[in-house]
Amino acid sequence: MSFSGFDIVVIALVFLVILVLFAGIKTVPQGNRYTIERFGRYTRTLEPGLNLIIPFIDRIGARMNVMEQVLDVPTQEVITRDNASVSADAVAFYQVLNAAQAAYQVANLENAILNLTMTNIRSVMGSMDLDELLSNREVINDRLLRVVDEAVGPWGIKVTRVEIKDIQPPKDLVDAMGRQMKAEREKRALVLEAEGFRNAQILRAEGAKQSAILQAEGQREAAYREAEARERLAEAEAKATTMVSQAIAAGDLNAINYFVAQKYTEAMTAIGTASNSKIVLMPMEGSALIGSLGGIGAIAREVFGSTPPEAPRPRPPAPVSAAPSRSAPAINPFAPNQGS
């Protein structure tokens, strides 16, 4: 099959159109931005999707990833403000906000961000003491984020986060910190133990004080009650003595007998209940005590009233005796000293 000159021209034109279409149609994937250069000069940025450019005049300059990316910061040797040497490593998260600035404002973007982050880690951590460095990691992260993000702003980059992953002091310094922590905890334990002992002593003293106060109040109340009882007893004894004195003044001998018998009985009771006396031998006349008791009975009849005399019992008839009997003299058991 032979082609004429016209057919060859048509085929060449079709091929050229297809080549132009392929050169002018650009597809940008999601999460990327392409910069377009015309004769080496930036003109615009292609968004994700299907885009058209002028073939053979415009070309793609830089393909920028605008998704958030992670940059691992290697371990850095840092000397703190108190001359302690520590090792620290970190991680940084950044995102391209302006593809043109990220492509044309800085060369080797990742290396620039990495070196900027490492420099600021040494600056920020070197301005802090070791204790502050170990306990304020969030403060370090905030300061690093603020400084690095401000520095990469003109590049069209947004640093979203800078995190210190690990801080490693030297082994001898770690051992010293461990001994210091142990000493601090022992000191705290001793202080707490001393405070507990002091509080216990105070509570015991307070308890003893309250007990002494209550005991003193109880003794005072008992003494008051005892004094009141003695006062009542003294009043009763004084009243009884007054009554006996009045009876004696009136010439009543039974009152004297009552008073003497009462004291006599009390004395005999004291002698009989003594702990050092087993057998008591003493001369005494029983009729005197009986006479005194008779006086007590007479006084009781006068106070409580005499009982009605009993009706006389009928006597049986006396037997007739041949010889007249002599009547024995009557003995009054309550009469004192009638002879033996």
Image (cartoon, rainbow, N blue to C red):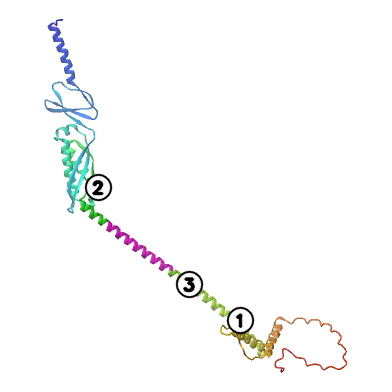
Residue at 34 percent of width and 62 percent of height: 193
Residue at 71 percent of width and 85 percent of height: 298
Badge 1 amino acid: Ala
Q: What is the number of callouts on the image?
A: 3
Question: Badge 1 local density, few (<14 within 10 Å), some, or many (20+)?
Answer: few
Question: Badge 2 local density, few (<14 within 10 Å), some, or many (20+)?
Answer: some
Q: Secondary structure at mark 3?
A: helix
- Eyeballing the image, is 145 above or below 181? above
Q: Secondary structure at mark 2?
A: helix
For the residues carrying marks 3 and 1, which lies nearer the camera in this image?
3
Residues in magenta? Answer: 182-207
Question: Badge 3 local density, few (<14 within 10 Å), some, or many (20+)?
Answer: few
Report how far apart the C-alphas of labels 2 and 1 lie in the structure: 93 Å
Q: Earlier in the sequence, mark 2 or mark 1?
A: 2
Report how far apart the C-alphas of labels 3 and 1 lie in the structure: 31 Å
- Eyeballing the image, is 215 above or below 278? above
Q: Secondary structure at mark 1?
A: helix
Badge 3 amino acid: Gln
Q: Which residue is mark 2?
A: 137
Report how far apart the C-alphas of labels 3 and 2 lie in the structure: 63 Å
Q: Disc 3, disc 2: CB below 8 Å?
A: no
**Residue 5 place in picture, x, y as percent:** 12, 7
Q: Which residue is mark 1?
A: 236
**Residue occupying the far top of the picture:** 1
Question: In the figure, is residue 285 to the left or right of 172?
Answer: right
Q: Which residue is mark 3?
A: 215
Q: Earlier in the sequence, mark 3 or mark 1?
A: 3
Residue 252 appears anywhere in the view: no
